[in-house]
Image: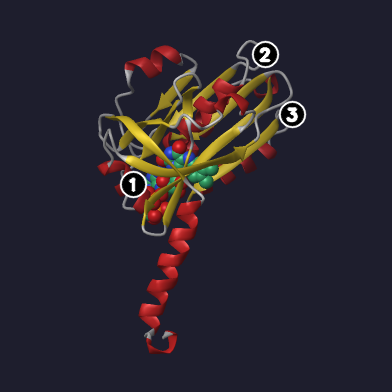
Amino acid sequence: MWLLLTKKEMANVLKKAMSGLFDKMLSSAKVIDVKYWNPSSMVEIEVHFPTLQTEKWKTIHRVKCRVGDLEYRDYTPSSWDTGKGTFKLYVEAGHDGAGSRWAQQIKAGDEILLGAVHAAQIPLKEGRILCMVDLSALGHVLSLKQLTDQGRFPMDVAVFLHESFHIPEYLQKENPEFEFLYRENEHNVSVLEEWLMSKKLANYESICIAGNTPMVSQLRKKLKANPQVGARILAQGFWS
Ligand SMILES: Cc1cc2nc3c(=O)[nH]c(=O)nc-3n(C[C@H](O)[C@H](O)[C@H](O)COP(=O)(O)OP(=O)(O)OC[C@H]3O[C@@H](n4cnc5c(N)ncnc54)[C@H](O)[C@@H]3O)c2cc1C
């Protein structure tokens, strides 16, 4: 039977089989709320997934979501409520990509397929944490904040915005230490570097950088070359 299939048909059969295999490793969860920022390219997705054991989380996690046929993307669960079995995803969806399209069409009541795994360590040495991220890593810093005792690990956070977003009031109220930085036509690295240079770098025990991969590696290089920096640097590139 196999010999009668063309190469294209064979590839399709294999693709379907692989997709079925991946999907079996994921679990079903329910979307309970979707909010769009202004502009609408930032999507907040609230998910109900009661079997996720968030009370055991000691590190930042990622959920691998099925966003299309054989298409899977990682997003960072944050603002989880163990009692209610819910968490939020903050998805940047202004570009053309399978994950972006998935987030733009998702609605409350949808069943989604996902699996949660460890994504990144959190700082262990007590002391101030400096965080520099772009909007795709907002969930990353919110998750870090939820996992750390803010008395022992106070955070100073800069979130680079590539568009002039209106930041939801609740987010600003709950996170006064987050600075959302937007400068028209300015590059992520120069905006974050200027912010970074306004800080007394010797005061930090840890520095976390996450988001666009070239941005992360350039900032990391600059910090490594700076003699004032004694902090441990935790860096994670998400997309390039
Ligand atoms: C551990 C981990 C956690 C992550 N958590 C989040 C999260 O919480 N929220 C989130 O939004 N993303 C997160 N990401 C990134 C996410 O998994 C996808 O890589 C990203 O959203 C792009 O997927 P896509 O299918 O939309 O675009 P792709 O098909 O991967 O890319 C299509 C095009 O869009 C460009 N592109 C991709 N992402 C962006 C972006 N954010 N802004 C502008 N252009 C882009 C690419 O360079 C490419 O040219 C995470 C990644 C990792 C590894």
Q: Nearer the viewer, mark 3 or mark 1?
A: 1
First along the sequence among labels 3 and 2: 2
The disc at residue 152 is 2
- The answer to whether the residue bearing label 1 lies less than 8 angstroms from the nearest atom of ligand 1 is yes
* Cα distance in 3D space between marks 3 and 2: 18 Å
The residue at the point 55 percent across, 45 percent down is: 237
Residue 33, quarter of the rendered image: top left
First along the sequence among labels 2 and 1: 1
User: Residue 207's x, y, as percent?
Assistant: 63, 30
Q: Which residue is mark 1?
A: 100
* Cα distance in 3D space between marks 3 and 1: 37 Å
**What amino acid is found at the position of numbered circle 3 in the picture?**
Gly
Task: Give the residue at the far bottom of this rendering.
Answer: 3
Q: Nearer the viewer, residue 187 or 210?
A: 210
Would you call the spot at circle 1 few (<14 residues within 10 Å), some (14-19), or many (20 or more)? some
Q: Secondary structure at mark 2?
A: loop
* Cα distance in 3D space between marks 2 and 1: 36 Å
The residue at the point 70 percent across, 30 percent down is: 229
**What amino acid is found at the position of numbered circle 1 in the picture?**
Ser
First along the sequence among labels 3 and 1: 1
Asked if the residues shown at circle 3 and circle 2 are in contact, with their CB atoms under 8 angstroms apart, the answer is: no
Image quarter hosting the N terminus: bottom left
The residue at the point 56 percent across, 36 percent down is: 61
Q: Secondary structure at mark 1?
A: helix
Would you call the spot at circle 2 few (<14 residues within 10 Å), some (14-19), or many (20 or more)? few
Q: Is residue 76 left or right of residue 200?
A: left
Q: Relative to 152, is 208 above or below?
A: below
Q: Which residue is mark 3?
A: 230
Q: Nearer the viewer, residue 140 or 1?
A: 1
